[in-house]
Amino acid sequence: MQLDPGTRTAHRTCPLCEAGCGLELSIKDEKVVRIRGDKDDVFSRGFVCPKGTTLGHLHDDPDWLRQPHVKRDGTFVPVDWDEAFAVIEAGLMPVLEEHGRDAAAIYLGNPGAHSIAPMIYNRGLIKALGTRNRFSASTVDQRPKEISSALMFGSVTVPVPDLDRTDHLLMLGANPYASNGSLCTAPDFPGRLEAIQARGGKVVCVDPRVSETAAKADQHVAIRPGTDAHLLAAIAHVLLEEGLADPSNVAEHCAGLDDLPETFASYSPDAVAPICGIPADDIRELARELAAAPTAAVYGRIGTCTQEFGTLASWLVDIVNLLSGNLDRIGGAMFAKGATGQPSTKGTPGSGRGFAMGRAVSRVSGSPESLGEFSVSVMAEEMETTGEGQVRALVTVAGNPVSSTPNSARLDAAIADLEFVVCIDPYINETTRHADVILPPPTPLQKSHYDLALLNFAVRNVANYSEPVFPLDEGQLSEGEIMLRLTALLSGESFDHVDTAALDELGTHAMLASAAKDPNSNVAGRDIDELTAQMSDHEGPDRLLDVMLRTGPYGDGFGANPDGLTLDKLIANPHGIDLGALEEGRVPANLRTPSGKIEVLPDPIRADLPRLAASLERAWDDDFVLVGRRHVRSNNSWMHNIRVLTKGRNRCTLQIHPDDAKRIGLVEGGAAEVTSRVGTVRVDAEITDGIRPGVVSIPHGFGQDMPGVQLSVATAYKGVNTNVLTDETFVDALSGNIALNGVPVSVTPAPSEVAV
Ligand SMILES: Nc1nc2c(c(=O)[nH]1)N[C@H]1C(S)=C(S)[C@@H](COP(=O)(O)OP(=O)(O)OC[C@H]3O[C@@H](n4cnc5c(=O)[nH]c(N)nc54)[C@H](O)[C@@H]3O)O[C@H]1N2
Ligand SMILES: Nc1nc2c(c(=O)[nH]1)N[C@H]1C(S)=C(S)[C@@H](COP(=O)(O)OP(=O)(O)OC[C@H]3O[C@@H](n4cnc5c(=O)[nH]c(N)nc54)[C@H](O)[C@@H]3O)O[C@H]1N2
Ligand code: SF4
Ligand SMILES: [Mo]
């Protein structure tokens, strides 16, 4: 397509998922006329998926709120910012004054992990709110992996498969052809998998479904949901028993290695085969191939986390990497070094305070704290259960927990009963319809972008910053300003006189002071005023980002390393800066365990192993179990309002195996009734032999047709919320993380569909 003169081009990173693809936008008359992959992006090299090309549609979506909304007599009305904050002050503060700070809960959602203002200001908001009731999407997602890594390495530093150099990839519970990868930032993940195959390597995909990824893999292993820990323990067993284990590259930095043979003694392939539904010989072969490959990496993702043995499975991924000699090794599982610094690159190299969890338990059912949060599994009960500490108010930032977390109907009712709800969110959806006040952020194209979280999990070390493509409209507030004003209000200050620049200066000062105090930082011992004098005039979260970059592992150290990174340098390089391939030999310097060793068998893991052992005796004979899935044109709960993405056949179907469908009398396209302990949904059947018998799959994030939701496209989409079925009591006991996969359900043809 030839573009008119007068068209300008802008480059920015896509904020929608972890891949972080570079986009090239063509803009005419301040409208996006085309988005394509940025061929010059140092990381994504022109790759883009269908969602990334719709950021212009998102920006123009008439349902995206452009000013705050306050609920009056059950209806949302637009108001100006001062009025919105005044309503919050009048409504929320009395609840906190009367019942204490724990009367508020906060839920931080997924897009906040891809948005610079929440990444930087959430911490201050949480502190100002002062509640112990903190929740996030992490406990419906990756918390088990965060915990297992932090226990082993002393901080949340997750090894990622070295996709571009490995010879063999064993992938469990991930479908990057749909998701584009997770806890493994790799734009064009599919292309990187195909490159493994093209260079003669092998890709093995372990999944109860023949996912898009499984279909392209060299081998598909159709595992029974929830049994990845059993499979991986058996792989470890074979490596140890057959003398194939060779962790010599990191052995001197490990504590507890000698305990592993006994730990896995009872997990022979024969013992786990009937549980996993995988022949014992196939399990042996998986182990032998891992050991024989010149380099190999095991990669587990959401299917291995959101299940009953999520933390053990996540730990076992790294144990098998370690035993097969592939941890911290080129072509194996490696550690990224993000440009903004991580706990594993700060402080004394080689040891640290380590990681503790369960420092508090939730009020009602005693669920353990981890990383300062409780599991979303207890959110509803904390709202419903009266007494000291009952949650009476909710703040959400970029989250839609009514759609995304288990037993949605219960949570929906609990939120409806709260005394006050504030949402920093652009849409009136399943959750925000309960808000008293909605504070909408500008669209992604009106914000700067740097993926502070996910570049720490990238398969190459890369830094990439994007300036806003469009300015704020008259009367719009930046997301950072919204957050700072709410923070000030919660701290008892007057929200209408908040000097956000002064708050940022305080933040900058604190960050510089902490870097100067760290004897290992590149500004150790320097004078704060001298450093401050050298700051460029960036504002808001960008100003703090600049400090992180400059004091980070590649930073200019405020002159100490003149060629190093600064935000100005990133702005001058809109296609990103490639900082090189991942380095091997990061261990032991990146460890932050008190022992200075990789804790191979940390105490909480050791204490959880009997639970796995007990399951060897269990009758694994549920009628049906439910798993999820993703589609490349859908993004969690909030992109179904973009018409171009929802076109085509209904994607919210119940996948079921033909033998099962026949057995229960379900026909293609017929309505099925699916019932779990907590709820029932009615959903169209899609009969496919691409799913294991006994397993059914429904994708999450659908079902926007609830009263009060104002999403004109999404509410018309034929879909159901699968989290009406997922069960808040079905968790990984160690982490408290929800088990979304392997949920026992019954399936029947919906009553009106029964053939007569
Ligand atoms: N059954 C089942 N449930 C699941 C999953 C599953 O696999 N199966 N996956 C889980 C996972 S991995 C995740 S991460 C969660 C995600 O669940 P949530 O954390 O609830 O995130 P989203 O569904 O993405 O909802 C995003 C919310 O953020 C708002 N939003 C969008 N952009 C912005 C922005 O720039 N700023 C702000 N302030 N708000 C914004 C949207 O309007 C929406 O309300 O779902 C989980 N739920
Ligand atoms: N298009 C799109 N991309 C996304 C998202 C999205 O909603 N849409 N969400 C983003 C987010 S928040 C995340 S966290 C990532 C997640 O990214 P992925 O981890 O790749 O998640 P999924 O694509 O859901 O793939 C999970 C696979 O696990 C399988 N599975 C289910 N149960 C089990 C089990 O017990 N064992 C094993 N081995 N496999 C199992 C499912 O069948 C499914 O194919 O995707 C991100 N990218
Ligand atoms: S893969 Fe993810 S980051 Fe890349 S264009 Fe698609 S949604 Fe955006
Ligand atoms: Mo996620």
Image (cartoon, grey):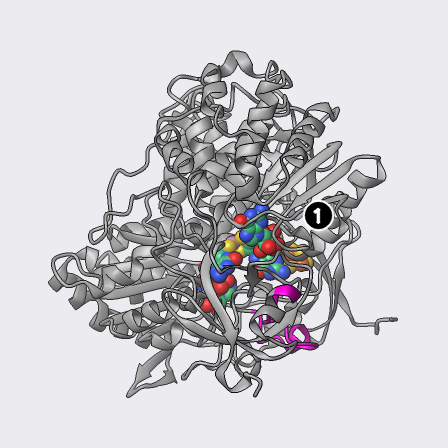
**Does mark 1 have its CB less than 8 Å from ligand 3?**
no
Q: Is residue 691 visible?
A: yes
Quadrant, the N terminus: bottom right
Q: Between residues 158 and 699, which one lies in front from this camera angle?
A: 699
The amino acid at mark 1 is Phe
Dividing the picture into quarters, in which one does residue 10 lie? bottom right
Residue at the extreme top of the image, as rendered: 252
User: Which residue is more in the foreground, 680 or 481?
Assistant: 680
- Is 287 displayed left or right of 41 in the figure? left
Q: Is residue 656 magenta?
A: yes
Residue 424: x %, y % from top left? 40, 66
Question: Is residue 380 shown above or below 365?
Answer: below
- Please tell me whether mark 1 sits on a helix, a strand or a loop: helix
Dividing the picture into quadrants, the one containing residue 172 is top right
**Residue plotted at (21% across, 72% down):** 90
Q: Quadrant of residue 734?
A: top left
**Residue 349 in sight from this viewpoint:** no
Say left or right for 570 vs 149: right
Q: Position of residue 195 (x, y in %)?
A: 80, 41
Nearer-the-camera pick, 37 or 636:
636
For label 1, count other residues whose C-alpha is less than 10 Å away and answer few (under 14), some (14-19) or many (20+): many
Q: Which residues are magenta?
A: 639-659
Say if 172 sits above or below 411 in the image.
above
Location of residue 19 in the rendering, given as x and y in whole percent from the top left corner: 64, 50
Residue 39 x, y percent position in the rendering: 80, 52
Instruction: Using the image as rendered, state which of residue 703 and residue 282 is in the foreground.
Output: 282
From the image, tell me which residue sits under label 1. 189
